Amino acid sequence: MKINNSQLTINMLAYEALVNETTSQADFFDEIKTAGITKIEVRREYIQDAADLVAIQQAAAGLEIELFYAVPEILFADKLLPLEDLETYFNEAHLLGAKQIKFTAGYAEVTQEEADELNRLLNKFGIENLTLENGQDPAFAKAETLYEFIQELKAKKLPVSVTFDTGNCLYVDENPLESFRLLTEEIRYIHLKDVSKETLSPTLNGEGDVPVKEILAQVPVTVNVAIEYPLGTHPTATLAKEIAKIS
């Protein structure tokens, strides 16, 4: 089950209870670095303004923290997001210095032109990893549907990978371990989250119904694993305990 320090990442959802009380997500970077994590996934919904993007980039650079960017949008909600919006999101990732951008997958009949536009944006803004997450909508988030969709995108020469959210499988009534195994060859990033099957609410690791140990035992050392669940009102203290469970 042990995850190497080089794989450890934190999604800023972990600081949900405090992040809206501060001026920037960067306010927590020092203590996250002290906890031993050098990879942080910034969430777009917590960005204050354009100046905040620059402040986050500068703080991360000063601490030698690698940033990823999570955009809370469905990339293909029946059709590709408007190009004007995509230009904005990719430019924001560029300003952060993030080489990875994450969307929720969605589903659509994708044209070659749409795949080409996404490739153009990846090249223009220097993004190395476009990764799509299994969401919570059974219309597109089931493992087999997502796997087939990824194959369709790759057939159109779009370099894309899966962000596997361990907890989201329960929202679409699938076995997380079976879903992980089906998607394994496409997974390049993990959103680690335990969830109670009864309440469908995130829990601390080991307190829900996701077979976290079994999944992590099969995660390659090349795949980053992000703690992506609320850590309460004392997140950094809780973070240390959660890290100890998996490393």
Image (cartoon, rainbow, N blue to C red):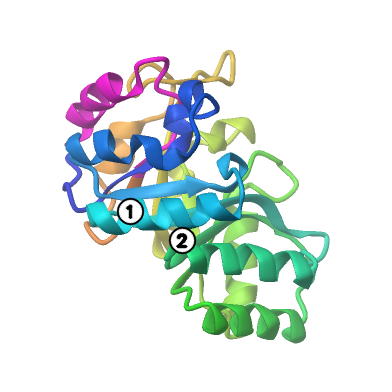
Identify the residue at horizontal 41%, vertical 57% (top origin). 57
Please indicate, yes or no, whether residue 161 appears anywhere in the rendered image. Answer: no
Magenta part of the protein: which range? 226-246
Q: CA distance from mark 1 to mark 2?
A: 9 Å
Give whichever of discs 1 and 2 has the lower sequence position.
1
Image coords of residue 41 (percent x, y):
42, 48
Is 159 above or below relative to 141?
Answer: below
Contact flag, marks 1 and 2 (Cβ < 8 Å): yes
**Label 1 sits on residue:** 60
* Residue 22 sits inside the magenta stretch: no
Tell me if 165 is positioned left or right of 76 in this view. left
Q: Quadrant of the N terminus?
A: top left
Q: Badge 1, how many Cα within 10 Å: few under 14, some, many 20+?
A: many
**Label ID, residue 197:** none
The quadrant in which residue 128 appears is bottom left
Tell me if 88 is positioned left or right of 177 in this view. right
Tell me if 243 is positioned left or right of 145 in this view. left
Identify the residue at horizontal 50%, vertical 35% (top origin). 23
Image coords of residue 192 (percent x, y):
39, 38
| Foreground pick, 135 / 95 | 95
Amino acid type for the residue under numbered disc 2: Leu
Please indicate, yes or no, whether residue 203 appears anywhere in the rendered image. Answer: yes
**Label 2 sits on residue:** 96
Image coords of residue 154 (percent x, y):
57, 78
